[in-house]
Image (cartoon, grey):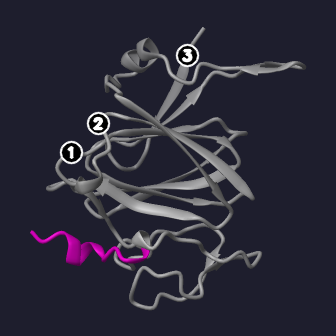
């Protein structure tokens, strides 16, 4: 029953995956993951861990990566809406430091595949969101790294977010257009910019 539509992004290795949704007056059905369909699309990654998180409006998680044991991630939203972002950190890549973002929601059913070698984060745009993702390697707390979500050199355009960069990754006066303040974990306020994190 499967069938997926796979769209390449402007950055090599990033894919938007849209499943076929079978709906009628009762509701809908879709396959959220089918290994055969993925393989036919040239995506042969193997997943070893599934994660799920919930967040309220204004929460920004990221930008996260693992240093020695990088994870590929297949991400989707099962409730609400988020703006999901990947930043290329692959050494020698022509798009190193570039970003790509996708709106993921329970309505559009889109999935975003982010391979190993990228930093990842998302901003919650709805009142509440539930976020699910499959990983190609296990999470190791001691291996975690991160980047400042608001690094001017990366220049992510977070939708609806207003505020002034104050030289660090703190919340400062950042807020959504409706006044909802930006909400970060303590850890995510301490990440440094790309230039100070990677030295080549």
Q: Identify the residue under disc 3.
A: 3
- Residue 81 image position (x, y, % from top left): 67, 51
Q: Is label 1 in a helix, a strand or a loop?
A: loop
Q: Is label 3 in a helix, a strand or a loop?
A: loop
- Residue 158 image position (x, y, % from top left): 55, 68
Q: Identify the residue under disc 2.
A: 137
Q: Residues within 10 Å of mark 2 (few under 14, many from 20)?
A: some
- Cα–Cα gap, marks 2 and 1: 7 Å
Q: Is residue 165 left or right of residue 126?
A: left
Residue at the far left in the pictured view:
200
Which quadrant holds residue 38? top left
Q: Identify the residue under disc 1.
A: 69
Name the quadrant of the N terminus.
top right
Residue range in magenta is 189-200
- Residue 179 image position (x, y, % from top left): 74, 79
Q: Nearer the viewer, mark 1 or mark 3?
A: 1
In primary-sequence order, the first of circles 2 and 3 is: 3
In primary-sequence order, the first of circles 2 and 1 is: 1
Q: Residues within 10 Å of mark 1 (few under 14, many from 20)?
A: some
């Amino acid at each position: 029953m499967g069938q997926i539509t796979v769209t390449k992004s402007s950055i090599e290795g990033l894919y938007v995956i849209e499943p076929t949704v079978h709906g009628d007056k009762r509701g809908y059905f879709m396959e959220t993951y089918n290994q055969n369909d993925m393989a036919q699309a040239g995506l042969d990654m193997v997943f070893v861990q599934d994660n799920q998180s919930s967040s309220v409006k204004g929460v920004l998680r990221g930008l996260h990566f693992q240093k020695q044991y990088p994870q590929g991630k297949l991400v989707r939203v099962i409730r609400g809406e988020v703006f999901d972002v990947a930043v290329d950190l692959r050494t020698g890549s022509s798009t190193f430091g570039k970003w790509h973002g996708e709106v993921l929601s329970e309505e559009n059913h889109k999935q975003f595949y982010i391979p190993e070698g990228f930093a990842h984060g998302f901003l919650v745009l709805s009142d509440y969101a539930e976020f699910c993702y499959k990983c190609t390697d296990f999470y190791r707390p001691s291996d975690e790294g991160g980047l400042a979500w608001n690094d001017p050199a990366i220049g992510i355009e977070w939708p609806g977010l207003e505020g002034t960069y104050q030289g660090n990754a703190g919340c400062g006066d950042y807020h959504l257009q409706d006044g909802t303040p930006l909400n970060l974990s303590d850890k995510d306020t301490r990440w440094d910019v790309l230039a100070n994190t990677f030295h080549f």
